[in-house]
Amino acid sequence: MNQLINYIKTYVALSDEECEVLMSLFEIRKLRNNEVFFEEGQIANELYFVTKGCIRLFYKVDVDEKTAFFYSQGQFICAGESYNLGIAAKENYQSMGQSEIVILDKKKVETLLQKDSKFEAIGRIATENELIASQKIIASFVTQTAEERYLELLESNSELFQNVPQQYIASFLGVSPETLSRIKSRILKR
């Protein structure tokens, strides 16, 4: 929880009392490897903050799973459309390896906002993180080749390759596992 508090403090000054209020609202949950903790069809009523491990965001398309994003330590997770509009979510979240998240219940967050608007930072930060991540993904698919996306992912999040099965990384990059193997081979030969 201290990790989340420190993260929020980078955006807004908090007194010790305000930190205690925040900590009383959070719930910590440990996740098992491959545990799906949020599924499409649910209505999102929680925000999550990753304190340990990696979380995969994926969509079910026919019989396939399409990986859209990986969240790592220090990132907020929110099924934004469902959370804000109260509609069924389209996304799924799955733990990659042993992970830990802090859960922020929507009703508790709304109650907190009524007490002090300073806490709007939580929702704003989560929303901004999602927007920035989405824009980066879209830009990478428009401006980069699969090989360039692979190299960027390797540079920005190399630990992902130790904890996440290759088929999920391939799906995230928009290629088949076989194509990912060929990309890796070409890069190793350089």
Image (cartoon, rainbow, N blue to C red):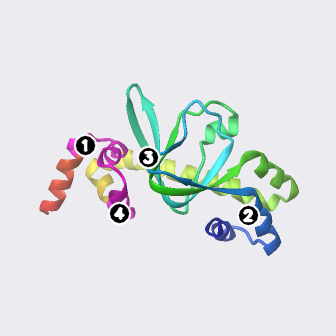
Judging by the rendered image, the residue that carries numbered circle 4 is 158
Q: In the structure shown, which secondary structural element does the residue marked by tag 4 occupy? A: loop
Q: Position of residue 96 (x, y in %)?
A: 43, 51
Q: Which mark is residue 23?
A: 2
- Which amino acid does the dot numbered 4 rest on? Ser
Nearer mark to the viewer, of 4 and 3: 3
Residues at marks 4 and 3 touching, judged by CB atoms closer than 8 Å:
no
Q: In the structure shown, which secondary structural element does the residue marked by tag 1 occupy? A: helix
Judging by the rendered image, the residue that carries numbered circle 1 is 177
Residues at marks 4 and 2 touching, judged by CB atoms closer than 8 Å:
no
Q: Is residue 87 above or below residue 31?
A: above
Q: Main secondary structure of the magenta part?
A: helix
Q: Residue at x 37, y 63 (%)?
A: 159
Q: Residue furthest left?
A: 189
Real-space Cα separation, disc 3 to disc 1, in angstroms: 19 Å
Q: Residue at x 76, y 69 (%)?
A: 19
Nearer mark to the viewer, of 3 and 2: 3
Estimate how packed mark 3 is, as few (under 14), some (14 to 19) or many (20 or more) residues with alpha carbons within 10 Å: some
Instruction: Tell me: 174 left or right of 115.
Output: left
In magenta segment, residue 127: no
Judging by the rendered image, the residue that carries numbered circle 3 is 34
- Tell which of 28 and 90 is nearer to you: 28
Q: Residue at x 41, y 42 (%)?
A: 67
> Can see residue 153?
no
Real-space Cα separation, disc 4 to disc 2, in angstroms: 31 Å
Instruction: Tell me: 126 left or right of 155.
Output: right
- Tell which of 77 and 187 is nearer to you: 77
